[in-house]
C-alpha cells in the first residue's frame, strides 16, 4: 500500500471514529491530488434531504461557497464551527495551496449536544433556517458532537489538513518542472482568477520580475493581465448563468468581481448583452 492509500485509510478511520463525513469544496485544480481521496461536495443523507426535498440546493451552495469564504477571510483563515440554515453543525477548515485559499474542508454534519444544545466556542450561526430541517432530523438523525470532543476534533482535523496541503503542494512542485512559462501562466490563471489576484503574485509564482511577466503576457497572449482575468471571470460567470439558479449579483461574487456593477459593465462589454439577457437566451438548468 502506497502513502496516499495509507492516508485514505486514515481518513476513513477518522470518519468512523467521529461518525462524520469529510467533504471538500475545491476552488482550484491545485487540490486535484486530494479530491480523489475525499467526498466532493455534501452528499450525505441529511444534506441531500435538505437540498433535494427542502429545495435548498442553491442556498446551500451560496452558504458554503460564498459566505464561508467571506467568513474565513474575516477570521484570518482560521478554522471554526458553523451551524447552517439546515440546522447542521460542521467544522470549517481552509485548505491552502501555494499560499492561497484553494478549497474548504467541511467535517460533519453533527447535531447540537446536551440539554441546552450548546455550540462550540466561536460557532458561526445562520441567521435563517429552512422549513425542512426538523423533518430531516427525524428521518436522518445527526450524531451529537459533545462540547468536550469539539476541541479534539479540531486539533486532529488540522493535522489531517496539514497533510492534505503537503500532498497538494508536493504535486505542484513535481508537475512544475519542465513546463513552459506560458503553460504555467495559463494554469495559474485558471486556478486563481477568482481570488485576490495581482501581477506581483503571478511574478512571485513564476520566480520572475513583474516587468518580465508583463513582457511574456504581451508576447505570448497579446493581452494585458486585467483583460485576461476579466475574460476568464466572464466565461466562468456565463456558465453559472446558464446552469444554476444563482442571481446575477451572487454570480458576480462567485466569479471574483469586486462589485455587481463592475461585473455587469464588463459582461456587457465582452458579451454584447446584459447578464440577464444572456441567461434568458441560453438558460439550460
Image: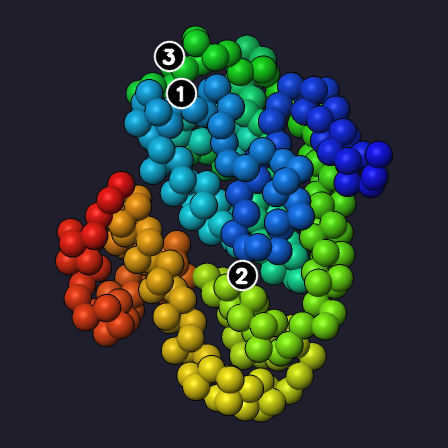
Upstream in sequence: badge 1 or badge 3:
1
Q: How far across and how far down the image is residue 237, in percent?
A: 33, 58
- Which one is in front, 81 or 32? 32
Residue drawn at x 41%, y 15% is: 136
The reply to whether callout 1 and callout 3 are in contact (CB within 8 Å) is yes
Relative to 243, does residue 272 appear above or below in the rendering? below
Q: Which is nearer the N-term, disc 1 or disc 2? A: 1
Q: Along the polypeptide, which appears first: circle 3 or circle 2?
A: 3
Report which residue position mark 3 lands on.
Answer: 135
Image quadrant where residue 148 sits: top right
The picture quadrant where one finds residue 19 is top right
Element under disc 2: helix
Q: Is residue 180 visible?
A: yes
Mark 3 vs mark 2: give the one in front: 2
Labels 1 and 2 touching (C-beta < 8 A): no
Q: Is residue 118 left or right of residue 9?
A: left
What residue is shown with label 1? Answer: 49
Choose between 79 and 213: the one closer to the eye. 213
- The residue at which mark 2 appears reads as 191
Instruction: Measure how far apart labels 1 and 3 are at the Cα level.
Output: 9 Å
The residue lying toward the viewer, choosing from 211 and 258, is: 211
Query: Quadrant location of residue 277?
Result: bottom left
Are there few (<14), some (14-19), or many (20+) residues within 10 Å of tag 3? some
Q: Height in image: 93 above or below 215?
A: above
Image location (x, y in percent) of residue 206 = 66, 76
- On screen, residue 226 above or below 154: below
Estimate the spatial distance between the alpha carbons at disc 1 and disc 2, rounded to whole Å. Answer: 31 Å
Amino acid at each position: 500500500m502506497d502513502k496516499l492509500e495509507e492516508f485514505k485509510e486514515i481518513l476513513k478511520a477518522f470518519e468512523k471514529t467521529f461518525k462524520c463525513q469529510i467533504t471538500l469544496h475545491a476552488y482550484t485544480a491545485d487540490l486535484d491530488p486530494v479530491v480523489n481521496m475525499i467526498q466532493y461536495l455534501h452528499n450525505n443523507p441529511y444534506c441531500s434531504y435538505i437540498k433535494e426535498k427542502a429545495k435548498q440546493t442553491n442556498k446551500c451552495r451560496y452558504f458554503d461557497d460564498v459566505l464561508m469564504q467571506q467568513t474565513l477571510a474575516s477570521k484570518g483563515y482560521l478554522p471554526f464551527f458553523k451551524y447552517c440554515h439546515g440546522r447542521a453543525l460542521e467544522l470549517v477548515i481552509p485548505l491552502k495551496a501555494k499560499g492561497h485559499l484553494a478549497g474548504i474542508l467541511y467535517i460533519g454534519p453533527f447535531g447540537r449536544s446536551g440539554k441546552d444544545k450548546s455550540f462550540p466556542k466561536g460557532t458561526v450561526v445562520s441567521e435563517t433556517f429552512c422549513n425542512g430541517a426538523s423533518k430531516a432530523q427525524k428521518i436522518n438523525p445527526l450524531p451529537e458532537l459533545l462540547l468536550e470532543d469539539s476541541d479534539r476534533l479540531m486539533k486532529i482535523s488540522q493535522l489531517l489538513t496539514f497533510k492534505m496541503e503537503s500532498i497538494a503542494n508536493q504535486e505542484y512542485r513535481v508537475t512544475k518542472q519542465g513546463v513552459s512559462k506560458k503553460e504555467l501562466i495559463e494554469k495559474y490563471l485558471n486556478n486563481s482568477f477568482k481570488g485576490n489576484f495581482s501581477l506581483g503574485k503571478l511574478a512571485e509564482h513564476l520566480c520572475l520580475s513583474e516587468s518580465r511577466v508583463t513582457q511574456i503576457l504581451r508576447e505570448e497572449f497579446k493581452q494585458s493581465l486585467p483583460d485576461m482575468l476579466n475574460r476568464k471571470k466572464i466565461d466562468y460567470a456565463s456558465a453559472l448563468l446558464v446552469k444554476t439558479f444563482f442571481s446575477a449579483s451572487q454570480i458576480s461574487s462567485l466569479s471574483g468581481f469586486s462589485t455587481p456593477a463592475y461585473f455587469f459593465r464588463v459582461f456587457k462589454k465582452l458579451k454584447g448583452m446584459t447578464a440577464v439577457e444572456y441567461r434568458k437566451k441560453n438558460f439550460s438548468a
